[in-house]
Image (cartoon, rainbow, N blue to C red):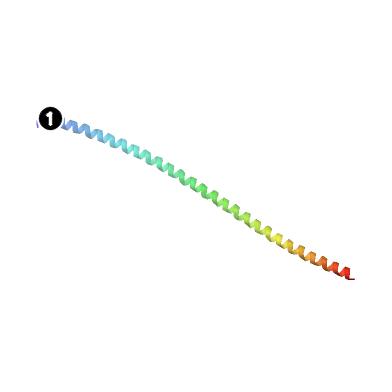
Amino acid sequence: MSDEELKKLIASNAKTIEALTATIAEDKAERKKAYQQWEKDRSQLYQYMGRIAAAQSSFYEVQADYYHQLATLSEKQTEMQEQISQQQAQIIEILNRLTSS
């Protein structure tokens, strides 16, 4: 191989190395940008999941309060029905005394 051919080969290899280096740098920059976008998307996803969890927690808290109120009202209604039944029994007893006298 002559010096001229060797110089051409070295120059060709240098251009190839430059092109590959530039391609690698571009690829690295694109991957970095894609990774940053992925991190941003992931962060937003976690924020949405946090909001959903908070909303779900609030819903369950309201639902529990609602069922507690229903239970309280049911207990009050049962107490009122018992009082009314006792009062009716007393009235019937009084009426029976009045009619027997």
Residue at 68 percent of width and 58 percent of height: 73
The reply, left or right, for residue 33 in relation to residue 23 is right
Residue 94: percent from left, percent from top:
85, 67
| Quadrant assignment, res 82 | bottom right
| Quadrant assignment, res 98 | bottom right
Of the 4 image quadrants, the one containing the C terminus is bottom right
Residue at 57 percent of width and 51 percent of height: 59
Position of residue 73 relative to residue 14, above or below, is below
Residue 5: percent from left, percent from top:
12, 30
The one nearer the camera, 95 or 87, is 95
Going by the numbered disc 1, the residue's amino acid type is Glu
Residue 1: percent from left, percent from top:
9, 32
Q: Secondary structure at mark 1?
A: helix
Residue at 43 percent of width and 42 percent of height: 41
Mark 1 lies on residue: 5
The reply, left or right, for residue 96 in relation to residue 5 is right
Outermost residue toward the bottom? 101
Circle 1 crowding by C-alpha within 10 Å: few under 14, some 14–19, many from 20: few
Residue at 22 percent of width and 33 percent of height: 16
The reply, left or right, for residue 26 in relation to residue 68 is left
The reply, left or right, for residue 93 in relation to residue 7 is right
Picture mark count: 1
Position of residue 66 relative to residue 19, above or below, is below
Residue 63: percent from left, percent from top:
60, 53
